[in-house]
Image (cartoon, rainbow, N blue to C red):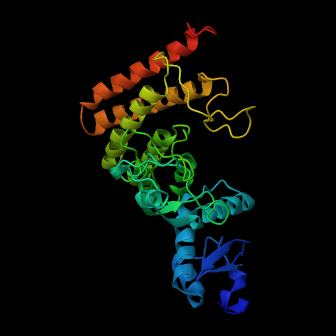
């Protein structure tokens, strides 16, 4: 694809940065992203019109939606960093297709016929991905990681809060969330356990959306709360081996720092009880308490009972952390 001459971009009004767009299978370097407050979204669309619809449209959206969210206190260099970072986030969306039932059949696993194969993700045959998802990096890491995505939504909410909410809701839907309540980790091993940051992301995005629009999206919050309650129950039932409110879980975000893989069985047998896993669960309980209080105020007083439930969970976990001994007593 050939771009118009540089003079067509009216470079005296623009400030190009080194990002890439992808169009028709090609990487296009040097497409300007704009920093001038005087350049309107309409003006940008006109300047980029010779390039073509998809590129012009995405660039216009990126600039138009970033402008209101950029703090006035930022220096020019800081504004460049923020704009480039958010442009990269917007461009890291990718359509992701993965039909687990089909993939498992192709690898000899047919649970409906009672035939099981020793292949990865064999317990996730309900999983069906056919959505646009925010990737860690769609060129180098073209797969989703759910706890990474939770952090993505915080940044994405600054420029597209509806997309951020859709992403959080997506991974709690019936095509993604396991029937037992577990959230998928990442494509090569959905069974891995990641830090439960999804509730924090849900609450943060909801709060920002409420600040932005003057009222909260209660339907979004209710849906996520109900599904996250299933996930919380999965943690309590599956990752508290001794039922003493001390949790395990695996690597839990601390990549490549241990002397052995905490996500794998111990070579000597037994299991780990982890301070970080327990701390994550305390955070989980406290955020669910916060969401329940919000829903009780904004929607239905019956959520007070759920608020009490998560308050009690938090106290039990905090007490366990204060009173656990090296002997496990």
Is 182 placed above or below 48 here?
above
- Horizontal relation, residue 83 to residue 174: left or right: right
Q: Position of residue 135 (x, y in %)?
A: 57, 59
The number of discs equals 0
Residue 193 occupies which quadrant of the picture? top right
Is 193 placed above or below 239 here?
below
Residue 303 occupies which quadrant of the picture? top left
Quarter of the figure with the N terminus: bottom right
Q: Position of residue 310 (x, y in %)?
A: 39, 25
Q: Position of residue 158 (x, y in %)?
A: 53, 56
| Residue 91 visible in the current orientation | yes
- Horizontal relation, residue 11 to residue 249: left or right: right
| Residue 215 visible in the current orientation | no
In percent of the image, x 52 and y 71: which residue is there?
61
Quarter of the figure with the C terminus: top right
The residue lying toward the viewer, choosing from 159 and 321, is 321
The residue lying toward the viewer, choosing from 96 and 80, is 96
- Horizontal relation, residue 215 to residue 27: left or right: left
In percent of the image, x 50 and y 60: which residue is there?
133
The residue lying toward the viewer, choosing from 116 and 128, is 116
Q: Position of residue 147 (x, y in %)?
A: 55, 45
In percent of the image, x 43 and y 59: which residue is there?
105
Is 4 placed above or below 12 here?
below
């Amino acid at each position: 694809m050939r771009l118009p001459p540089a003079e067509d971009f009216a470079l005296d009004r623009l400030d190009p940065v080194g990002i890439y767009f992808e169009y028709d299978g090609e990487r296009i370097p040097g497409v300007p992203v704009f920093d001038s407050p005087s350049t309107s979204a309409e003006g940008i669309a006109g300047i980029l019109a010779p390039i073509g619809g998809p590129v012009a449209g995405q660039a216009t959206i990126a600039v138009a939606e970033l402008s209101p969210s950029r703090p006035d206190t930022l220096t020019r260099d800081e504004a460049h960093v923020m704009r480039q970072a958010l442009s990269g986030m917007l461009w890291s969306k990718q359509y992701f297709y993965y039909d687990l039932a089909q993939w498992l059949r192709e690898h000899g696993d047919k649970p409906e016929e009672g035939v099981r194969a020793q292949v990865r993700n064999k317990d996730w045959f309900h999983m069906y991905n056919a959505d646009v998802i925010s990737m860690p990096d769609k060129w180098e890491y073209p797969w989703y990681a759910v706890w990474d995505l939770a952090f993505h939504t915080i940044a994405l909410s600054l420029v597209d809060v509806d997309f951020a909410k859709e992403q959080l809701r997506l991974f709690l839907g019936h095509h993604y969330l396991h029937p037992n309540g577990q959230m998928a980790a990442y494509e090569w091993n959905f069974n891995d356990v990641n830090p439960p940051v999804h509730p924090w992301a849900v609450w943060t995005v909801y709060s920002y959306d409420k600040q932005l629009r003057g009222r909260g999206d209660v339907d979004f919050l209710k849906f996520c709360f109900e599904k996250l309650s299933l996930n919380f129950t999965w943690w309590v039932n599956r990752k508290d081996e001794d039922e003493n409110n001390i949790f395990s879980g695996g690597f839990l975000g601390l990549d490549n720092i241990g002397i052995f893989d905490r996500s794998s069985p111990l070579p000597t047998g037994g299991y780990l009880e982890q301070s970080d896993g327990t701390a994550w669960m305390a955070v989980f309980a406290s955020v669910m308490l916060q969401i329940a209080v919000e829903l009780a105020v904004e929607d239905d007083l019956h959520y007070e009972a759920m608020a009490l439930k998560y308050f009690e969970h938090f106290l039990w976990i905090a007490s366990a952390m204060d009173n656990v001994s090296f002997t496990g007593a």
